[in-house]
Image: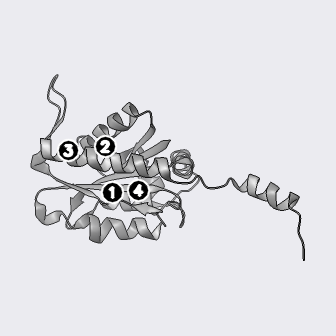
Amino acid sequence: MLVVTLGGSPSQRSRSGVLLEKTRQWLQDKGVEVVSYQVRDFPAEDLLHARFDSPKVIDLLQQVANADGLVIATPVYKASFSGALKTVLDLLPERALAHKIVLPMATGGSIAHMLAVDYALKPVLSALKAQELLHGIFAEDSQIAYAEGSAQAQLVPVLEHRLHEALETLYSAMARRPKPLDPHVLNDRLLTARWSI
């Protein structure tokens, strides 16, 4: 199994990044291959000018095409997900998330931002034809402590529990989903099929 994680924070230090790091660790412990991206990994010029021929963009598109699942985490700014994340999502083809299981996550200053996942991020992911869009996770900033010195980043127990439950759901959904038929195999089958009229 392959999961692509995409972080929507332009900041080097972000709570949504902590959620993705915890996600990566959990999935890798289950034997899942994880490829991670942050919006800051992409040159701003490539995003703003929609340069589909950028090596970093080509790599992202290829990894998303091969992925079984996608985990997206973003900070909430002014009742929506980050604009930088939107510029990355705009580079994905219309059906990029077909046959993918998607888990959206968001962080924000208060519970008042919780609906941003449902009303801002999920519609964009649905437009990209996500096969299964899981119930998202919202974390208040106060529930996530950054790593300090030798201490690792920490989640409050209730958030850690919700994250593990969501990741179990993601893992189970990916394990049960049928693999799409490779276009080359389908083409070979059509060419060698016996047709009757």
Q: Quadrant of residue 119?
A: bottom left
Residue nearer the viewer, 26 or 168: 168
Q: Nearer the viewer, mark 2 or mark 3?
A: 3
* Residue that sits furthest to the bottom in the current view: 197
> Residue 112, percent across and down?
12, 66
Residue in view at x 17 percent, y 32 percent: 147
User: In the figure, 18 relative to 186: above or below?
Assistant: above
| C-alpha distance separating marks 2 and 3 | 15 Å
Pick whichever of labels 2 and 4 is earlier in the sequence: 2
Q: Quadrant of residue 55?
A: top right
Label 1 crowding class (10 Å Cα cut-off): few <14, some 14-19, many 20+?
many
| C-alpha distance separating marks 4 and 1 | 6 Å
Residue in view at x 53 percent, y 62 percent: 98
- Kind of residue sitting beneath label 2: Leu
Residue in view at x 43 percent, y 52 percent: 173
Pick whichever of labels 2 and 3 is earlier in the sequence: 2
Pick whichever of labels 3 and 1 is earlier in the sequence: 1
Q: Is residue 85 left or right of residue 11?
A: right
Tag 1 residue: 104
| C-alpha distance separating marks 2 and 4 | 13 Å
> Residue 181, percent across and down?
66, 55
Label 2 crowding class (10 Å Cα cut-off): few <14, some 14-19, many 20+?
many
Q: Are marks 3 and 4 in contact (CB under 8 Å)?
A: no
Tag 2 residue: 20
Residue nearer the viewer, 112 or 190: 190
Tag 3 residue: 161
| C-alpha distance separating marks 3 and 4 | 19 Å
Pick whichever of labels 3 and 4 is earlier in the sequence: 4
Q: Is residue 11 at all visible to an observer of this figure?
A: no
| C-alpha distance separating marks 2 and 1 | 11 Å
